Image (cartoon, rainbow, N blue to C red):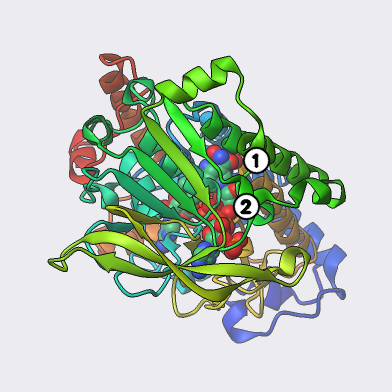
Amino acid sequence: MAPRCWRWVRSSVWSRTRPPPARSTRAPVFCQWFSSQTTPQICVVGSGPAGFYTAQHLLKHHTRAQVDIYEKQLVPFGLVRFGVAPDHPEVKNVINTFTQTAHSERCAFRGNVAVGRDVMVSELREAYHAVVLSYGAEDHRVLGIPGEELHGVCSARAFVGWYNGLPENQGLTPDLSCDTAVILGQGNVALDVARILLTPPEHLEKTDITEAALGALRQSRVKTVWIVGRRGPLQVAFTIKELREMIQLPGTWPILHPSDFLGLQEQLKEIPRPRKRLTELLLRTATEKLGAEEAARQASASRAWGLRFFRSPQQVLPSADGQRVAGIRLAVTRLEGVGEATRAVPTGEIEDLPCGLVLSSVGYKSRPIDPSVPFDPKLGVIPNTEGRVVDVPGLYCSGWVKTGPTGVIATTMTSSFLTSQALLQDLQAGLLPLGPRPGYTAIQALLSSRGVQPISFSDWEKLDAEEVSRGQGSGKPREKLVDCQEMLRLLGR
Ligand SMILES: Cc1cc2nc3c(=O)[nH]c(=O)nc-3n(C[C@H](O)[C@H](O)[C@H](O)COP(=O)(O)OP(=O)(O)OC[C@H]3O[C@@H](n4cnc5c(N)ncnc54)[C@H](O)[C@@H]3O)c2cc1C
Ligand SMILES: NC(=O)c1ccc[n+]([C@@H]2O[C@H](COP(=O)([O-])OP(=O)(O)OC[C@H]3O[C@@H](n4cnc5c(N)ncnc54)[C@H](OP(=O)(O)O)[C@@H]3O)[C@@H](O)[C@H]2O)c1
């Protein structure tokens, strides 16, 4: 027997003409109809961990779903390629899993397509049964303090993009001719950036850091890096593995002031376990007497890094000619409140810290993608319930644009699986349009009329092979291609 709303079911424009029916009423009949007749056409926007994990879960749990992954860069993998530090190659192994997903005959990668510019979300929603926005957090939070525009100040995001070969950051050329750099913020990105600044360049030679960044780091005169937090040792946002790496960095010495740790020993037993172990390591590093071997290591270290606590950035101080950074003005703070809600409030005391480079590492930020998509500018996320975009049936989100810009790849995976699960539940419940949808066929025609030439996964594999081959001469896993024109030329475009 045909489903109750046969004509409604066959309509491919239900989202414009009819409101979606209430969730609980018609699930079984429509679900059967859909599953035996129609290929769900789903598109994912963004090819970072969220995009690939969402696609993986959809393909695994729906045996006929077709998933197209749109990506604005020419190349896939988001922050796994352009964020994860070059000296953490093991983290990039997830690329193997993503590649398997991309090789599925029901999955297609469509690189070089910026959604919101080359094609609008409304157009994708017309062409597909469901659209998942997984476009990450491409911007950074600004501090909004005077002097942030001075030469010698940049975001950690741009610095990371520079050493990782993100095309848009290749013009950055950070000035590493100074003795002291200051990093604002005490998260894992801050530690990544500090580590790259201080690691002896010969230790980076066999990584996939770009040749240009390696060259600049070889010339670097930065000897001291201060990592500044507005709160205290109990509130640092970095994790123990990354701290340990800093402590063990060759030729480098940590500077921690024992006075910052007064009273912490007594509080240890009340602190939950991961934070407790991190605090113990900080405490030991700050207060333990050095053994002979450690003392010798300290004496021979030519570089240093330190944590400055209870300091909130107020102003970037200009050099005498007003042209560049000469230092940073910090407000001394104290803590108010308890637990996670602890806030830093200024004591009224001010401190100036001389430096020639300021890297602001106070978090990433998502952008709105297109006026048709709701966006919460305060939280920097797409408002959603379990990945369902609020008030927009058929539209979903996953990854950092769903949760905000925190969490490692594993947490992004879990949350992306949940979004995919929600989408599949809606499909089962008959809450998505049920008639056939054209999927990429319709979008391809639009893109072609707009002069956009998408990059396929096999195109990426050609670029990948070229990168690997270029890296071989110098013993690197790859030499990243950083010039989009060159990439297109290599693909014969
Ligand atoms: C510097 C840094 C280092 C990190 N290191 C680690 C680590 O070592 N280990 C770990 O577990 N986690 C690490 N993380 C966290 C991890 O990278 C994130 O959890 C994860 O990348 C978030 O995934 P995502 O897919 O939401 O975002 P992203 O990885 O940013 O992917 C989003 C994708 O969407 C694309 N996109 C954006 N806008 C559009 C558009 N308009 N149209 C089409 N495509 C678009 C982007 O180009 C990008 O490819 C790191 C994060 C940063 C910032
Ligand atoms: N190796 C890894 O696994 C790895 C590497 C890199 C990144 N990541 C992950 O990626 C995510 C993002 O990292 P992130 O370092 O960008 O962000 P984060 O972990 O949120 O850290 C941001 C830091 O900036 C500070 N901050 C924010 N606003 C500030 C302000 N106005 N003034 C002064 N300080 C301010 C925060 O202090 P408050 O706490 O006081 O707000 C915090 O110390 C994290 O989940 C991280 O673990 C993981």
- For label 1, the SS is helix
The relative height of residue 341 versus residue 247 in the rendered view (above or below) is below
Identity of the amino acid at label 1? Leu
Query: In the figure, is residue 360 to the left or right of 37?
Result: left
Q: Which labelled disc corresponds to residue 476?
A: none
* Quadrant of the image occupied by residue 354: bottom left
- The image shows residue 287 at horizontal and vertical percentages of 65, 37
Mark 1 surroundings: few (<14), some (14-19) or many (≥20) residues within 10 A: many
Quadrant location, the C terminus:
top left
Quadrant location, the N terminus:
bottom right
* Quadrant of the image occupied by residue 394: bottom right
Query: In the figure, is residue 268 to the left or right of 52?
Result: right
At x 42%, y 52%, the residue is 183
**Residue bearing the label numbered 1:** 282
Q: Is residue 399 visible?
A: yes
At x 32%, y 26%, the residue is 201
In the foreground, 465 or 240? 240
Identity of the amino acid at label 2? Asp
In the foreground, 317 or 407? 317
- The image shows residue 411 at horizontal and vertical percentages of 68, 48
Instruction: Report if the CB atoms under discs 1 and 2 are less than 8 Å apart.
Output: no
At x 21%, y 47%, the residue is 173
Q: Which labelled disc corresponds to residue 260?
A: 2
At x 34%, y 53%, the residue is 158
The relative height of residue 354 versus residue 239 in the rendered view (above or below) is below
* Image quarter for ligand 2: bottom right
Labels 1 and 2: the sequence-earlier one: 2
Query: In the figure, is residue 76 to the left or right of 432?
Result: left
